Amino acid sequence: MKGKILVDIATTLLRARLRQTIVAAVGVTFGVAMFVTLLGFMNGLNDMLDGLITNRTAHVRLYNEIEPNPAQPVALAAEHRGAYHFINSVKPVNGRKEIYSVAKVIEAVTADPDVLGYAPKITAPVIITDGPVELTGMMYGVDVDAELQLYRFADYVVAGNPRDVKIVPNSVILGKPLAEKLFVNIGDVVSIATAQGEQFPLKVVGLYQSGLADLDRTLCYASLATVQKLLGQNASYITDLNIKLHDINKAPGKAAWYASLFRVTAEDIQTANAQFETGSSVRSLISYAVGITLLIVAGFGIYNILNMMIYEKMDAIAILKATGFSGSDVKSIFLLISITIGIAGCVGGLVAGLLLSWGIDNLPFETAALPTITTFPVSYNPAYYAIAMAFSIVTTYAAGWLPARKASRVDPVVIIRGK
């Protein structure tokens, strides 16, 4: 019964200051809406940019790095052991580029429960010519089925069918900017020259665009068999093994383990793209900081309104306490007012934030650099809405606690005597 009376009193005070109540609730609504919208948009942008890297980058890449031999002849001489060796112009070892015993490596990777899948690849520098135009490029020999399954290869083939590079003999998919430089299109034939001086005609069956312009200007794809034939190698010739894991966070540990197990160079995605990952973290941090600041500002608005309400309602507070209401009852009344404003503003803010996010998500956004994107990216992660709701309630409670505490300490005798 007493609780109902306290709610009725709080409702009466809210109605008496309806305009200020609405202003306070709108402040919370604006803060929550901007928090949700800003986080959704910024993290949607982060997901899109991360996708440009993660969709096309292996979690762990195995390959043979060409580097100088650490055991130089002077270090092997008995008379120079234990001395410091200063050697200039050390030449790299003329080692093989392919992965040694690749069948055994694939067998071990396939048996690893942490591995989602793998895609073998051959990397070869080439010169691409079409008539008088001659450009240097990088040719990737790929297993098309693995690329389609693990790395969303089809999303980036903007013209032609990606499977044609496997079906059509002696065919190639060119980066779209590269094809524009060569003035060729689907169905044309380009000449590919390898580092060994061999030259082969290949038919263009598709155009590729990843959104990374520098990469697309030099890149072309062919099947594993085609590139092996270009290089004069057998069917076991593989220079890279791109591994995708179930959990990307295990990549650094897996890379170190594979490097020691197979005696190859292993590069994890975090090391390869450390700068890009840092940029995403900074953008997310800025979004959270701005959103929380908006909610704190809204909390100060509630604090000021409740303070003014207490000063204006000193007579009513004194009468309440004189008629038997305790200080904790008065405190509960003003906390109810604060929480009511917070909840109303929070619900309105969540709805407004969802509508704003939906509006941004449907705005056209088309650019040649991002062929798979047609609208602005927005993330609807429920965690953002839960954080906004929790923080808005905590902020409004904190904003109402100090004025409520002040109201609970009002001495009715002093107020009535002053009147």
Image: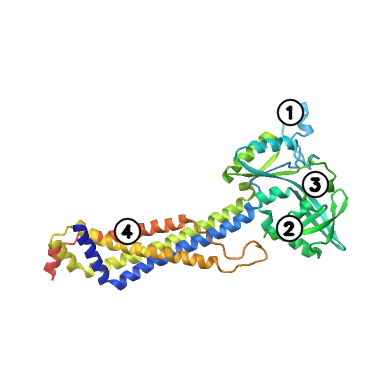
Q: CA distance from mark 4 to mark 3?
A: 68 Å
- Residue 110 lies in quadrant: top right
**Residue 396: x %, y % from top left:** 34, 60
Question: Which of the two discs, 4 and 2, sits closer to the camera?
Answer: 2
According to the picture, the residue beneath numbered tag 4 turns out to be 397
Marks 1 and 2, the one that precedes in the sequence: 1
- Left or right placement of residue 74 versus residue 402 in this view: right
Give the amino acid at mark 3: Ala
Kind of residue sitting beneath label 2: Asn
Instruction: Name the residue beneath numbered marker 1.
Output: 81
Q: How many marks?
A: 4
Q: At label 1, which amino acid type do we have?
A: Arg
Q: Is residue 18 above or below residue 286?
A: below
Secondary structure type for disc 1: loop
Q: Earlier in the sequence, mark 1 or mark 3?
A: 1
Tell me: residue 231, above or below residue 338: above
Q: What number is the disc on residue 221?
A: none
Left or right of 408 in this view: 155: right
State which mark lies toward you, 1 or 3: 3
Which one is in front, 70 or 134? 134
- The spot of residue 403 in percent (x, y) is 27, 62
The answer to which of 345 and 86 lies nearer the viewer is 345
Q: Is residue 18 visible?
A: yes
Compared to 217, does 272 lie above or below? above
Residue placed most toward the observer, 246 or 30:
246
Please tell me which of labels 2 and 3 falls first in the chain. Answer: 2
Q: Are marks 1 and 3 in contact (CB under 8 Å)?
A: no
Q: Mark 1 Cα within 10 Å, few/some/many (few <14, many 20+)?
A: few
Q: Are marks 4 and 1 in contact (CB under 8 Å)?
A: no
Mark identifier at residue 225: 3
| Residue for badge 2 | 161
